Image (cartoon, rainbow, N blue to C red):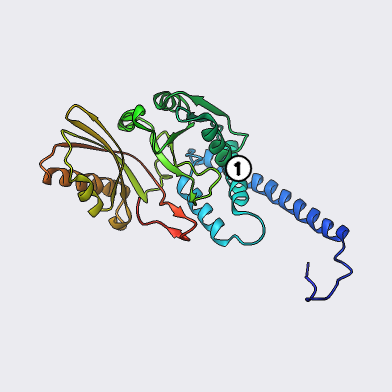
Amino acid sequence: MLKPSAGEVSPLETLASLREEIDRIDTALHRLLMERGQIIDHLIHVKAQQGGGSAFRPGREADMMRRLVERHDGLLPVDTVETIWRIIISTFTYVQSNYAVHADISGGDSVMRDCCRFHFGFTVPFKTYGDIASVLKAVTDSKGDLGLVRVEAGASAGPWWTQLAGPAAPKIIARLPFVERPDHPAGLPLFVVATPLAEAAARDVVILSVTSDRWQDDLPHRFAEQNIEILDKNFAGSTCSLMLAVCNEKLGQESALMANNAIEERLRKLFHECGLKADVVEIGSHAARFDLTLGRQEAAP
């Protein structure tokens, strides 16, 4: 509907006509959602004919959310827009392949529950556990469920990431929120854990579990020089367990397998140069973080 010029009063701009416009838009939105559902239904049949595949596309989701907030403007808060789209994406994923979200609430139930409902809505079942090990077991025993674990799980959790090291073990597939900002209503940094993804994985940042025979105080400096972030560490006697995040952007257009080998070899070489023995295993990956206040993707993990 065209707006009148400044100082001009349009006879069409009555409360009734404006409400009619809102009703028209609401009806159009509902029709578009139903149309999206029809496409998803067709997608399910096409996937079945082609041998199936994961319903989760964490890289695509991250890109959709980034583009959404970049183009957003106007009166409606970005928080509302983000949660609407998160519910749409998560619910249609659930329609494709039913799943539940298992969450570690050892750091607080209410915060984790708020984050789960913001990112996954109310249609997706939400189950809580008192420790990370129980979450990982629930994901392992499921046919495609997700687990939510705090990025900063705390010392009491121990080196939980080592449980992701086996080839059949769950892996980190995403980091939430996809769009970061200081006042985010569900801004608790979370890892999404799931059964290993193949073609759907986002690999901007690769997460690795490293077990070294000992620790050296200059390791943080050496990691920083190579754009490697220490996410967590745990000591048991002289043995040191680390969870590291490595930015994958400098590996070029190599295949996923070559990229895996390049990152792991890069770390093994670093530890060898320090005179340390280290076991290095990839335990997941996720899309690059996007900071709304900066208006760009972060280069760092």
Report x, y in % for residue 241.
Answer: 25, 33
Q: In the image shown, does 211 or 171 lie closer to the viewer?
A: 211
Q: In the image shown, does 250 or 211 lie closer to the viewer?
A: 211
Q: What element carries label 1?
A: helix
Report x, y in % for residue 4.
Answer: 80, 73
Give me the residue at 47% from left, 26% from top. Answer: 142
| Above or below 212: residue 251 | below
Task: Count every numbered label the image shows and give the total.
Answer: 1
Q: Name the residue under label 1.
A: 87
Report x, y in % for residue 205.
Answer: 35, 48
With 46 as the anchor, is 241 left or right in this view?
left
Give me the residue at 45% from left, 23% from top. Answer: 130
Give me the residue at 26% from left, 49% from top. Answer: 258
Q: In the image shown, does 187 or 17 lie closer to the viewer?
A: 187
Is disc 1 surrounded by few (<14), some (14 to 19) or many (20+) residues within 10 Å? Answer: some
Tell me the quarter of the image containing the N terminus: bottom right
Please, what is the three-letter code of the amino acid marked with disc 1?
A: Ile
State which quadrant residue 134 falls in: top left
| Above or below 15: residue 149 | above
With 89 as the anchor, is 4 left or right in this view?
right
